[in-house]
Amino acid sequence: MILKIAFRNIFRQKRRTILTALAMIVGFTLSSIVIGLSDGAYSNVIKMFTGNRIGHIQVHQEGYHDKPSIYKTISNYESIGGTIQGNTDVETWTPRVYAGGLGSVGEKSTAVRIIGVDVAREIKATQFNKKVVQGNALTETASREAVIGQGLAKTLAATLGSKIVIFSQAADGSIANDEYTIVGLAESGDDITDKITCYLHIEDAQELFVLEGRIHEIVVIISNINKVGKITEAIKGSLNDSNLEILPWQVVAKSFYDAMQADKQGDAVARLIIMFIVAIGVLNTVLMSVLERTREYGVLKAVGTKPIQIFWLVICEVVIITIGSICIGALLGILINYLFSIYGLTYAEGLTMGGVEFGTMYAEVNARSLMIPGITVMLSATLVGLFPAIKAARIMPAKAMRTH
Amino acid sequence: MEQNQNTDVIVTESVTKVYDADGIPVNALNGIDLTIQSGEFTAIVGPSGSGKTTFLNIISGLDAPTEGKVWLSGKVLSEMGGNELSDFRRDNIGFIFQAYNLIPVLTVEENVEYIMLLAGVPKSERHDRVVAMLESVGLKDVEDRLPTQLSGGQQQRVAIARAMVSEPTIILADEPTANLDSKTGSDLLEMMSRLNTETGMTFIFSTHDPMVMESAKRLITLRDGQIDTDETK
């Protein structure tokens, strides 16, 4: 009967119910969109940052990540790559050689970071060819070609067809010195990277630095980034080599990951503010509703309704409105997030997140964008409903029935 | 205080009630000592502000006295907690209010059924008792209507049915005929008098209505929160 009275009270006070529900629906939907957009943005940023650059998992010689050195190499990388590929969650892998040096074009020189790539594998793993915005990607066989970042090309006043001379120190202690033809200019999405990077064919890089078939890094691409921890552990188990370090992207790009976590905390604050507004709206309407019905609660109590039953009556009304509002809010949240996932939200000026710049933010329709607002709206509505519920339960019948 | 628990349903001892009216103490009741026995048909009369409604509220536990004690069916009301008092009212007292005070979202049938539902009476028994009670108050045909769809007289009949359906020991009626025309008031009074005779329930009215005073077997007059006269016919 208490539930029946609660239901009927909700429909009796339609305007108040609509106002209360609106506060909840708007709060839920806004919160859902904030989560959907931020999750979508994080997913895109992570996808761009990992899929196009650092990969999802990296394999190095032990200690390379903390203190990179040209001497910390992996020699049997084909065999290691084969073992990694044996994991069904692994899509592909690609080897890389890294070294620092001096790059010169004509009379201009600057510090460069040389990355030796297996062209065919790199294209498959990180869509290397799509980074080349002018000219061509490297050919699949070593041909003394180079692709340099656009920023580096600007610094060195280099154009397609220019010759770049690399000076460095080889792994055997000798002077590394050779000349390559610039066949393409690359844009990775990160200006700093583009100002210093020079891509060579992996065999050219191995020859330049006298690495004799050795590499510095294996980049692994997996099918589901959310399972990166589990897959990292699985690869560690299958390689079982203490001389190797196998690291997930969160460790490889710790500062990027930390920056994203800080961004997420910012979102939590935004959600908290939204929920605070919802709570105030709900408190106001529920409290008004209780005050308006003081006489009715007095009558209910007079005829034998227990204080606890009156408490539950008020809570039931709040919970029923909340459930209805959550259902409507969920539908709206899914619809809006779905539209944003297709059309995106374009910024007039690019937005930077975790050091990655992007102009359009795409939302994600996921369980989190429904669960978190759902739980928060339910908790905040029930919590603010407690005060009016206790007030109603403690009403003195004679005094309550004197009110109009 | 000595009590005859077989016949004394209400006993008050030095009951005082002081209200705070914007910082000014107002004495609504000034040391009322009264005993009401089972089966009485008693009217409490007096001018406005004499303390009639306050007295009814206090003897039913709807309000607490500032001083003094109230025994209802042998139990001291001030010694009961909130839930116990609610249960006690539900099982022992039926209320009839001047403003009817029906639950607006429940139908006639549901309003009458409500108290039995709180008391855990089985569904089939509830239904039988509601049907019988609505028939006895002449509302058999309006059981599915909401209170707002009834006339004042019909609403008061529902209130009487609600008060009586759970067969309480005492019926407290606060100005039950005040909002009714004389014909309806007379019919309801006759009905309550009949129920008092047939069931032996105790009826206590607060009233200004000469018709109610005429019907009452005991007439208690309050003046300035004190018993002025107490006559048994």
Image: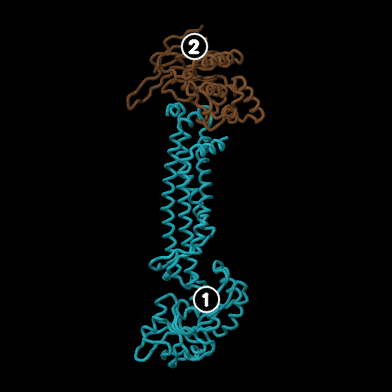
The quadrant of the picture occupied by the C terminus of chain A is top left
Q: Is residue A185 visible?
A: yes
- Give the colour scheme of this rendering: by chain
Give the chain letter at badge 2.
Answer: B
Q: CA distance from mark 2 to mark 1?
A: 98 Å
In which quarter of the view is residue B224 placed?
A: top left
Q: Are marks 2 and 1 on the same chain?
A: no
Is residue A284 or residue A232 the one in the foreground? A284
Which amino acid type corresponds to the residue marked 2 in the rendered image? Met
In which quarter of the view is residue A34 placed?
A: bottom left
| In the image: residue B83, left or right of residue A280 | right
Q: Which chain is cyan?
A: A
Is residue A121 or residue A115 the one in the foreground? A121
Is residue B72 or residue A282 the one in the foreground? A282
Q: Which chain is brown?
A: B
Q: Compared to A227, does B78 lie above or below?
A: above
Which amino acid type corresponds to the residue marked 1 in the rendered image? Gln
The residue carrying mark 1 is A58
The residue carrying mark 2 is B211
Image location (x, y in percent) of residue A286: 45, 40
